[in-house]
Amino acid sequence: MTHEVLDSPGAGRKVIRGGGLRAGGYLVSIALSIVAAPLLIRHLGVADYGRYLTVISLITIVAGVSEAGLNALGLREHALGDAERGRAALRHLVGLRLTMTVAGVVLAVGFALAADYTTAQVVGAGLAGLGLALVVVQETYAIPLQTSLRLGWVTAIEVLKQVGTVSAIAALVLADAGLEPFFAVSIFANGLALAVTAVVTRGQGGRAPAFDRASWWSLVRDTIPFAVATALGIIYFRITIVLLSLVSTEDQVGYFSAAFRIVEVLSGMPWLVVTAVFPILVRAARDDPARLRHAVGRLTHVAALTGAGLAIGLLLGAPFAIAVIAGEDFNPSIAVLRIQAAAVLGTFLLATWGYSLLSVRRYRALLAGNVVALVAAAAVTLALAPSMGARGAAVATVVAEFTLACCYLAALLGGPEDVRLDVRWLPAALLAAAAAIAVPLVLGLPALLAALLGGVIYLAVLWVGRAIPPELFEALPFRGRGTA
């Protein structure tokens, strides 16, 4: 069934609609987080919120290292293999990921102790680690939903997870809880998502994790460079806050954390959308190079336009976003967020080009790019953060994102797949971005109105300049049946 769906003429249209649905669900999740974030940040205050996000960043690094690209590997195996092979792969992947996660959490707790973090932070690392173990199982057993393009269920489960997170945070704030219990929120939310996933995927994947080292090795031996690249990708994006916590003050960490959290939430969108397309990229890479080249070109086009639009909105609306999310105590975060806004565009591009390289098994190119990005992030943070604080760390984030994007693009264009990008839409996009930023700033509008007007101008100029891909309109339900 999976292969029939992925190879069908309507697969492209299903992916566009499914990707749009996932993006819509992600926007709903963002809206929910807008409810939760102010409650959490204002309740904890500058110092405690900095401590909270430091631990969450530490566990997120563990998640990236222990995940090591295995979820993408599971998607590929399930998209290419038969049902029995897919089920076996899922069981082995769960066992491997759980083992690596437990080891990573133990190391994270040890680091928290060695770094002389507070008791609440040390305990919090353990609690957040348990929540991570639950999401490992949930994400792996949700793979059949993605490869069969049942993206409505994928979206619903993601939104449900966010509802659980918001509900738990609100309950803890009402109970006037201290820092420590907030680290357990992920246990409740991820446990809820796992329960629903188990019901929806009943019969599509093995339930018991498999702990067979020989089978683990057969799965990952050809993808070790990609596994290391994925781990480094998680580390470089969050190494800035860890290094900042070591070379700057708690207040600077708090200011950076508020802005970083907003950017981090928005930066999750491209990964969700590109993951929806990934099974088709895998099939095209094996069977239809022309289809692959077309898909990469269109994905790049959409990623650039969407990422630039969100970056412009964030740049213009930064004062409003910080006021709503964090309050006036975090006013220094406004400048930090405006710097980090550019990173959103970089993330959209590198997500697209990274998954394109993965689909053609260019693992060493992925690894090399992430090594360069990690070095850039660490070097710029250590160079700027001691004197510039949160703003220096923000510059490091932007530099790292675009460094990695450029590395991926160079590898993609210079590879044997003969990928070429049609950029005839670029002049109209640049004009749209310039107009969207300049007009609201010249008018001196309040932040929210500036962001809204900038968005309208951006879309209008793109429309007039015919820079919006026609496939997006053809996939709309009321436009009838288009082509894949």
Image (tube, rainbow, N blue to C red):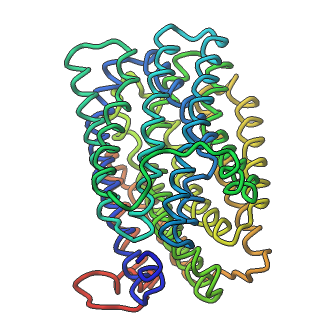
Question: Is residue 44 at all visible to an observer of this figure?
Answer: yes
Q: Quadrant for residue 354, please give it.
A: bottom right
The spot of residue 76 in percent (x, y) is 57, 66
Q: Is residue 239 left or right of residue 91?
A: right
**Vertical arrangement, residue 198 with respect to residue 364, above or below:** above
Q: Nearer the viewer, residue 197 or 344?
A: 197
Quarter of the image that includes the C terminus: bottom left
Quarter of the image that includes the N terminus: bottom left
Which residue is found at the position 78% from the left and 48% from the top? 372
Which residue is found at the position 66% from the left and 65% from the top? 358
Q: Quadrant for residue 406, please give it.
A: bottom right
Which residue is found at the position 38% from the left and 32% from the top? 186
Q: How many marks?
A: 0
Q: Nearer the viewer, residue 341 or 64?
A: 64
The spot of residue 450 in percent (x, y) is 34, 53
The spot of residue 383 in percent (x, y) is 76, 31
Q: Is residue 304 left or right of residue 331?
A: right
The spot of residue 185 in percent (x, y) is 34, 28
Q: Nearer the viewer, residue 96 or 340?
A: 96
**Vertical arrangement, residue 299 with respect to residue 178, above or below:** below
Question: Is residue 263 at all visible to an observer of this figure?
Answer: no
Which residue is found at the position 58% from the left and 18% from the top? 109
Q: Nearer the viewer, residue 183 or 414?
A: 183
